[in-house]
Amino acid sequence: MDSLMAALVAALLIRATDPTATYVAHFADRSGKSGAVLAGALVAILIAHAIAAMAGFFLAPHLTPNPKRLFVAFALLAAASGGIWPGKPIEPGEARRPFWTVAVRLIAGGWSGRTEFVTLALAMSGTAALAGIGGFIGSAVVLGFAALGGDLIWRTLPHRAISLVVGGLLAVAGFWLAFSALRLI
């Protein structure tokens, strides 16, 4: 159960600072088909988090507890850096076939996504299936809000302030786990 809640909270925080949510909100407004955009986003994050959970399941037996904790710390620090130094926004492209456009774009971006990396790390250090489910639920909530709320609502949020606070929280958690894994605290 710890893996589920940790992955869910991490996905909520990280995905809120991720350019994918802005992309989904903008593309939903541009295409006028929020349902198709949301369905494409859900399929994409389901695939990405399932792959991350399976990879964590297969990598977990090869590591002892301290390297697993250090891997989670590294994933949190990588996620923090993305929150503190925001990435380049994703260009929405054409609004034809919104389901496939969003699904393919998010699957391709999922291989380097911060949320999926944290899901992988939590799957290695806990129950892999629960980490994958938690990562999917947390991502689905944020992307669902972005798709259904649209660009107007999503852009009114103070993204820079949210990114800095979330990045700071993730950095503190990452450093604490790293020091704990290295037996410095």
Image: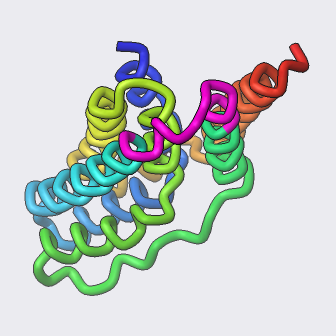
Residue 104 at x, y percent in the picture = 25, 74
Whether 50 is drawn above or below 135: the answer is: below
Whether 80 is drawn above or below 106: the answer is: above
Asked whether 132 or 81 is in front, the reply is 132
Residue 175, image quadrant: top right
Residue 48 at x, y percent in the picture = 31, 56
Could you tell me which residue is drawn at 27 percent across and 32 percent down?
129
Asked whether 128 or 154 is in front, the reply is 128
Whether 71 is drawn above or below 105: the answer is: above
Q: Residue furthest front?
A: 62
| Residue 49 located left or right of residue 120 | left
| Residue 109 located left or right of residue 99 | right
Whether 136 is drawn above or below 112: the answer is: above
Could you tell me which residue is drawn at 43 percent across and 78 percent down?
91
> In the picture, which quadrant includes the N terminus?
top left
Asked whether 142 or 125 is in front, the reply is 125
66 part of magenta stretch: yes
**In terms of secondary structure, what is the magenta stretch mainly?**
helix
Residue 176, image quadrant: top right
Asked whether 41 or 92 is in front, the reply is 41
Picture mark count: 0
Residue 21 at x, y percent in the picture = 39, 54
Instruction: Tell me where the magenta segment starts and ends, as one range.
Output: 57-70
